Amino acid sequence: MTTPAYTGWRKSPRSDDGNCVEVGHSDRGSIGVRDSKDPGGPVLDFDQDSWMAFTRHVRAGRFDR
């Protein structure tokens, strides 16, 4: 299996001093997440349904400390 190619990397406008992650879209339709300080490093790859569920829970405050 080949590694997907990601494009359109972006980070939240709420990010501070580079301590954040970036999100991009792959050529397979999945969502990639990487450390913005290490753009050549590993990428976590999520299918669309998993990513939508995660962002829904974040917006609902489910992961707030």
Image (tube, helix red, strand yellow):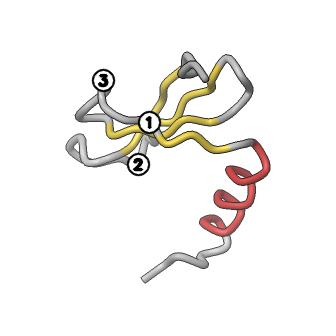
Q: Amino acid at mark 2?
A: Arg
Q: Position of residue 58 (x, y in %)?
A: 60, 66
Q: Residue at x 62, y 36 (%)?
A: 31
Residue marked by disc 2: 14
Q: Residue at x 55, y 16 (%)?
A: 5
Q: Amino acid at mark 1?
A: Val
Q: Image check: 28 left or right of 5? A: right
Marks 2,1: beta carbons within 8 A: no
- Asked if one can make out residue 7 in the rendered structure from this viewpoint, the answer is no
Classify 47 as above or below 57. above
Q: Residue at x 63, y 44 (%)?
A: 46
- Asked if one can make out residue 32 in the rendered structure from this viewpoint, the answer is yes
Q: Residue at x 59, y 76 (%)?
A: 61
Would you call the spot at circle 1 few (<14 residues within 10 Å), some (14-19), or many (20 or more)? Answer: some
**Which of labels 2 and 1 is toward the front?**
1
**Which of labels 3 and 2 is toward the front?**
3
Q: Residue 43 has which mark?
A: 1
Q: CA distance from mark 1 to mark 3?
A: 9 Å
Q: Position of residue 18 (x, y in %)?
A: 24, 40
Residue marked by disc 3: 40
Q: Earlier in the sequence, mark 2 or mark 1?
A: 2
Nearest the viewer among 43 and 20 is 43
